Amino acid sequence: MLNRDQILQAQDLPHIDVEVPEWGGTVRVRAMTGHAREQYEEAYLGIAKSEANIRAAMCAYSLVDDNGELLFTLDDIAALGKKSAKALMRVFEAAQKLNAVGDSEAQEKN
């Protein structure tokens, strides 16, 4: 049986690198922490599609640098949402897979 220390020390945030030609390179997409997932769901799953940047938000909560630190803050979501839809979809799909977020869950209210 796992103990507290084993659980807290487990490296359980996998990542994948995604080529995004529209942005001219590769980005790292990491699984969200439990806290980030709660923030994402609270902020974005309960509002109307027309008011949400669901894909940009998922990207903001999942894009990290080489050290695993988030590249974007909540304040960046609107700006990120103005980037290429095709590029955002590449990252969103990778983040969706890593975070086990399905289409039905992302569109739960709508």
Image: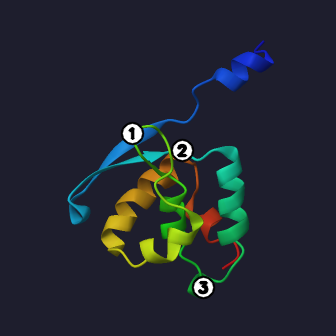
Residue 86 sits in quarter: bottom left
Query: Picture coordinates of residue 80 (x, y %)?
Result: 43, 71
- Horizontal relation, residue 26 to residue 7: left or right: left
Q: Earlier in the sequence, mark 2 or mark 3?
A: 2
Q: Which residue is mark 1?
A: 66
Question: How far apart are the alpha carbons under marks 2 and 3?
Answer: 25 Å
Q: Which residue is pictured at 54% across the width and 44% down the height? A: 31
Label 1 residue SS = loop
In depth, the one of 69 and 41 nearer the eye is 69
Q: Quadrant of the C terminus?
A: bottom right
Question: How far apart are the alpha carbons under marks 3 and 1?
Answer: 32 Å
Q: Which residue is pictured at 51% across the width and 71% down the height? A: 77
Residue 51: which disc?
Answer: 3
Residue 31: which disc?
Answer: 2
Q: Earlier in the sequence, mark 1 or mark 2?
A: 2
Label 3 residue SS = helix
Which amino acid type is marked by label 3?
Glu
Query: Picture coordinates of residue 62 (x, y %)?
Result: 50, 52
